[in-house]
Amino acid sequence: MHPKVKDLLASGAQLTDAALERLLPSPDTLPHSIHRAMRHSTFAGGKRLRPILCMEAARMVAGGKEIPAGAADLGAAVEMLHTYSLIHDDLPAMDDDDLRRGQPTCHILFGEAIAILAGDALQTLAFQTIASLPTNPAAVVAILRDIALAVGTGVGSNSPLPPGMIGGQVVDIESEGQPPTAELVESIHRAKTGALITTSIVSGGLYGSGGGESVDTIDRLRTFGQKAGLAFQIVDDVLDMTQSSAELGKTAGKDTASIKATWPAVYGIDQSLKDAEQLIADAFEALAPFGDAATPLKSLALYLVERKN
């Protein structure tokens, strides 16, 4: 990993963790069980990629050297949503996993009922946090709308965007055991994983501009997020097939065992890696007008395809 990317990840994770520490109820807050469950999953060692992408998009659009004040809270809210999705994804009714980020999953330590409620509480706290962001109301509404669409199913949104994270999860569950097709795999990846990565970047841009962004800027950020998000999931699929559970921090080989629709299952590992590289190249092109200001986001996108866990 390039030293500058390492520093970017470390400083971004530090900002995110400080915001999460401040925003999440303490483990001594009643009722203890749910707040301890929320904190266990949130502080179990995630890379904080989504909040870092969010903060760097805010910095780029704001045109300053520093991350705008309050952007760390938005990043923390995105991380809460990501963590809620992981808690629910690991449940016995979903992927039924007992390891996440190298730690026991939430339901293993706290039971299924508390794990479900911990995920629900993190989702609620995320939207409460966004509603309290220190920016103008128009920007807050735009951010809330974009993130809500990205997390949901897309029903009734009148939006040209694909269904969000929950919609992708439904398709993923219902397609288990079916022969994977290119169309099916791409639709799942763009929704289940790509939607939250994309909105992390778009919402950061909305925050950085204070609601005064141009349509072209948001379109470019969305294209970058969609390309980078798909590349991230393709690499995740490859790693699931090539790395050990210890290296991944989660149970390896589950996608193959469950006959899940994955990119390598359709295209093979070599072509999958080539596809990820091309997607990153396309993502870079979308940010060309931003010049050197886009370097941190581009560095993070490269990391998404070069990582080993």
Image (cartoon, rainbow, N blue to C red):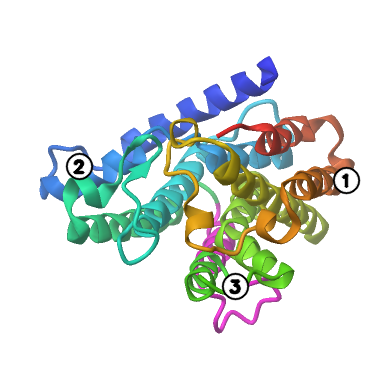
Which numbered tag is attached to residue 285? 1
In the rendered structure, the answer to whether residue 147 lies left or right of residue 229 reads left
10 Å crowding of disc 2: few (<14), some (14-19), many (20+): many
In this picture, is 66 found above or below 63?
above
Q: Nearer the viewer, residue 232 or 83?
A: 232
Query: x and y percent of residue 111 in the render?
Result: 17, 54
Residue that carries the numbered disc 3 in the rendered image? 163
Residue type indicated by callout 2: Arg
Residue 41 percent coordinates (x, y): 32, 43
Residue for badge 2: 36
Q: Range of the magenta residues?
A: 136-162
In which quadrant will I find the N terminus? top right
Q: Residue at x 22, y 48 (%)?
A: 108
- Is-magenta flag for residue 97? no
Tell me which amino acid carries mark 1.
Glu
The kind of residue on which mark 3 rests is Pro
Q: Is residue 59 visible?
A: yes
* Dot 1 crowding, Cα within 10 Å, few <14, some 14–19, many 20+: some
**Residue at the top extreme of this rendering:** 3
Q: Secondary structure at mark 1?
A: helix
How far apart, in angstroms, are the residues tagged by discs 1 and 2? 43 Å
In this rendered view, identify the residue nearer to me: 140 or 184: 184
Would residue 303 appear left or right of 259 to someone viewing this image?
right
